[in-house]
Image (cartoon, rainbow, N blue to C red):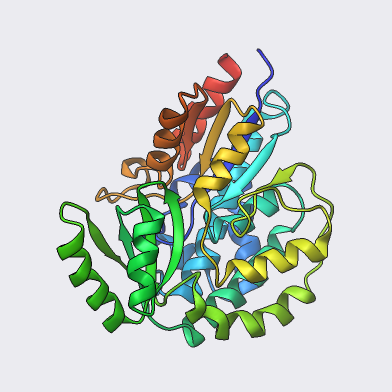
Amino acid sequence: MAERKLLLIFPGQGSQYVGMGSDLVDEFPEARNVYERASAVVGYDMRELSFEDPRDELNKTRFTQPALLTHEVACLEAFRALAGDAVGTPALAAGHSLGEYSALVAAGALTFERALGLVSERGRLMSELGRGGMLATTLDVDSARDLADKHFCGIGGCNLPDQTVVAGEERDLDALTAEMAERHKGKRAIRLNTEGAFHTYLMVSAAQPFREVLETAQLEPLSFGVLSNYTGGLHDAEPSAIRSRLFFQLFNPVLWFDCLNTALDTGIDTIVELGGGIGKGASPAEKRPNLEGMVKKTLKSRDDGAQYLPAINAAGIRAAVQQLIGD
């Protein structure tokens, strides 16, 4: 098997669904262990929340973030257990928004328990102190910023050259959407199901107390590189610099397109997506990967032949590892 230059990627909020992880715990003892550890940290039954959601809490930010981190790490541990030493050490990891914490777990900077404590508090603060909503558009960033600046909104994410997320107060987003329909006919705008204008100035009130939480977090040396949403480049190895960039990430745009390009510029030839899922299907096997479209459009725009493999459920993990080992 030829040596791979592997990038692990993890999706963010919006890729949660009821039932996520249920297939993993049926098949992988490593995943069962992750869910047991999660329940001990958060103080509630993570399996019940993720698999059944009896109190309709999974889409509330304070629960979404720890549940999604748990699913992503469970996928990671199942992937590692199947792959063993055959795949080797990844070259890089990256995560979209919340997924950046999973990337830091994968690279050894955070233990799962420490990351879970951080995202639990992050989710609570974002839910309680944040305001507004988010709008996914098919605008380029300059056009989106021109509208956002006029309507007291901000850029929440740069996912692709023609996929920019704007965020702001609900009434401001309404006004922005109306003007966009007039000025940019044929362009789409979809309101996202979030509890706030994430990654904009409306999250500063949440970021300020979260800084105190970050400053007490113990970080270990990175075992491989992790991309920063805030800079679009690699995290510095210094723990204080990682904490600072996680702080700024809360109220600055997610530079996902830059992260992908930075990774591909290093010669990445294989990308594996771990965790989450989207789509109308109810079971884990019916879900589609959240980041696949962004990855494949980026590869196409660069004429890059890197391979993309989804590993977001038990069947996908088995298939991805078989593909990697078989090659």
| Screen quadrant of the C terminus | top right
Q: Residue 281: x percent and y percent? A: 26, 48
- The number of numbered badges drawn on the structure is 0
Q: Residue at x 41, y 34 (%)?
A: 296
Question: Can you tell which quarter of the image residue 169 is in?
Answer: bottom left
- x 38%, y 61%: residue: 165
| Left or right, 185 with reference to 10 | left
Viewer-side residue, 34 vs 103: 103
Is the residue 178 above or below the residue 228 in the image?
A: below
Measured as percent of width and height from the top left, residue 57 is found at 40, 74
Q: Quadrant of residue 316?
A: top left
Closest to the observer: 227 or 182? 182
Q: Position of residue 157 (x, y in %)?
A: 46, 59
Q: Is residue 26 above or below residue 113?
A: above
Question: Horizontally, is 233 left or right of 69 in the view?
Answer: right
Q: Is residue 213 above or below residue 318?
A: below
Residue in front for this viewpoint, 170 or 46: 170
For the question of whether residue 301 can be seen, the reply is yes
- Can you say which quadrant of the picture contains the N terminus? top right
Nearest the viewer among 53 and 178 is 178
Residue at position x 56%, y 59% from top?
A: 69
Residue 273 relative to residue 232: left or right: left
Judged left or right of residue 228, residue 152 is: left
Residue 130 in the image: state x and y as whole percent: 47, 83
The quadrant in which residue 49 appears is bottom left
Can residue 19 be seen by looking at this rendering?
A: no
